[in-house]
Amino acid sequence: MYIKSIRHYKKIKGKRVFLRASLNVPIKKGQVTDGFRIDKQLHTIRFLRMNGAKIIMSGHLGRPKGEYNEKYSLFPVAKYLEKKLSIKIKFIPNQLDFEASNAVAEMKEGDIIMIDNLRFNPGEKKNSKRFARQLADLADIYVNDAFANCHRAHASVSTIKNYLPAFAGLLLEEEIKNLHKVLKPKAPLVVILGGAKIKTKLPMVNQFKNKAYKILVAGALANSFLSSRGYEIGKSLIDGETQVFANKYKKNNLLIPVDVVVATSAKGTKGIIKKISEVRPSDYIFDIGPETVKLYSSIIREANTIIWNGPIGFYEIRAFRHGSLEIAKAVASRSKGKCFGVVGGGETVDALKLSKTEHNVDWVSTGGGAMLAYLGGKEMPGLERLVR
């Protein structure tokens, strides 16, 4: 495998670099509340500045539907980066007007300009050649450090590479190297699947179902598998596509919970532990129970490769957080030794952080859907010409 990394380019000094970053982070009251994804890209930004580049960076935030919406402005992200880098960043609220061109013309080595949300322009999601060319006209070279968006055929991720010499950023390089390791996993492989829906996970499941020693199912995904095997799931969340897949899955390497934590209302704050056979029609399943934690943890301890995507339960509420925290601890305790562990997906990473074990896992990916797409062998427009 070859990665066309920016670290190997020797002519960065003085060059205008369009840095496609991954900036889709949670913001509340004008403040970035979780900078994990941004922080992982600081290495690339510092590398470019140290080598004398002029950085024009941008990305997207949310789904503004191709028009300006202050709610989705990247201005708070620019302020967050200013604090992290201890520099002033020139923010361009209007993407490609004279202000942007003039600001670029006046840049000095090490300067950073941030152009506002690319999805304010409908050409971004349409993968418009015209919009890609407008972005490319601002720069001399292109660097993609937005692994989380590489499964999207968008103008700033895909078509822009037609108009500029293109390179992978340092984070993108690390993402590919680490995820590539699990494509040929050292046995035994344990896959942990949580969350609500199977659709985005299906390519990865099909890729690994014959390689996995065990697939541990939890979260709302588990409800469909429980239902398909004749268990009562009460009023628990269920997804039709997951149900269809669960009905068809015949391999015996997939495990379902043996006990669960339920609530008696959709807004329940108190959990009740029940065996699977004890769930009533009025119950809501919100977490795995202690026996399932014990079973799953024992299997994780046998693994030499671990892939985890999707939260274990309704971890946002303290009463239903135990399963996610314990599985996170089990994954972390097994990783960084003989076992290679990979975790991805925004909510999964949140759960890992709650357990304070994120630094004990070999690789915590910044991409949820992108990680699933890459491991599932799907097309990755953002990686074309950068990875082969």
Image: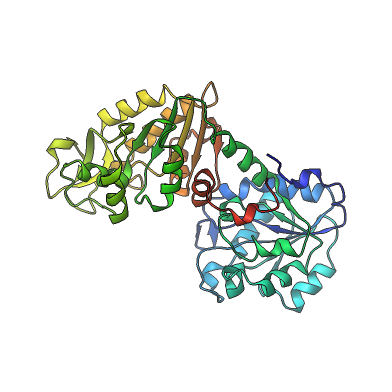
Return the residue nearer the eye: 341 or 97: 341
The extreme bottom residue here reads: 98
Return the residue nearer the eye: 224 or 110: 224
* Quarter holding residue 109: bottom right
Return the residue nearer the eye: 218 or 248: 248
Report if residue 271 is visible in the image: no
* On screen, residue 187 above or below 123: above
Q: Which percent across, then down, holds residue 53? A: 82, 54
Report the coloring of the rendering: rainbow
* Quarter holding residue 152: bottom right
Q: Which percent across, then down, holds residue 322? A: 32, 36
Instruction: Tell whether 305 sits left or right of 213.
Output: right
Return the residue nearer the eye: 287 or 373: 373
> Is the N terminus in the top left, top right, bottom left or bottom right quadrant?
top right
Q: Which percent across, then down, holds residue 353? A: 47, 40
Instruction: Tell whether 197 sits left or right of 231.
Output: right
* On screen, residue 120 above or below 220: below
Report if residue 337 is visible in the image: yes
> Is the C terminus in the top left, top right, bottom left or bottom right quadrant?
top right
Q: Which percent across, then down, holds residue 295? A: 30, 26
Residue drawn where x is 38% and y is 43% of the image: 311
Residue drawn where x is 33% and y is 39% of the image: 217
* Quarter holding residue 3: top right
